[in-house]
Amino acid sequence: MIRWFIVIFLALVCISWFSPLLQKLGFGKLPGDLRFRLFGRDWFVPVTTTIVLSLVASLIARYA
């Protein structure tokens, strides 16, 4: 279970780094991706995008 937490954390870090490119491809605008404003700052939590990209990464790892 710890391994999945690490994988999800790393996926979130990668998504935040590649966010501009992924938004051009349509990621980050999926249903389930949360955007909200709290304490005067915009927050983005890409839940659905993380799940989709994690599934793609696991499929690539399994069959590569």
Image (spheres, rainbow, N blue to C red):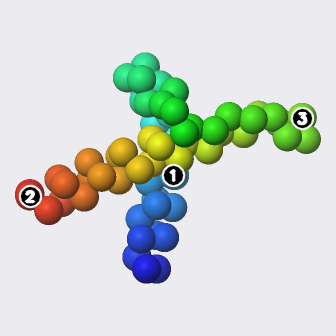
Q: Position of residue 29 (x, y in %)?
A: 51, 27
Q: Of all residues shown, which one is farthest toward the front?
A: 31
Q: Residue 63 — which label?
A: 2
Q: Residue at x 42, y 23 (%)?
A: 26
What's the CA distance linking mark 1 and mark 3?
Answer: 22 Å
**Residue 62 sits in quarter:** bottom left
Query: In the structure shown, which secondary structural element does the residue marked by tag 2 occupy?
Result: helix
Res. 16 in view: no
- The 10 Å Cα crowd at callout 2, few under 14, some 14 to 19, many 20 or more, is few
Q: Residue 12 — which label?
A: 1
In this picture, is 6 found above or below 29? below
Residue on which disc 3 sits: 40
Which of pointers 2 and 3 lies earlier in the amino acid sequence? Answer: 3
- The 10 Å Cα crowd at callout 1, few under 14, some 14 to 19, many 20 or more, is many
Which of pointers 1 and 3 lies earlier in the amino acid sequence? Answer: 1
Q: Residue at x 43, y 80 (%)?
A: 1
Q: Position of residue 61 (x, y in %)?
A: 18, 60
Badge 3 amino acid: Gly
In this picture, is 24 found above or below 12? above
Which of pointers 1 and 2 lies earlier in the amino acid sequence? Answer: 1
Badge 2 amino acid: Tyr
Query: In the structure shown, which secondary structural element does the residue marked by tag 3 occupy?
Result: loop
Callouts 1 and 3 close, C-beta under 8 Å: no
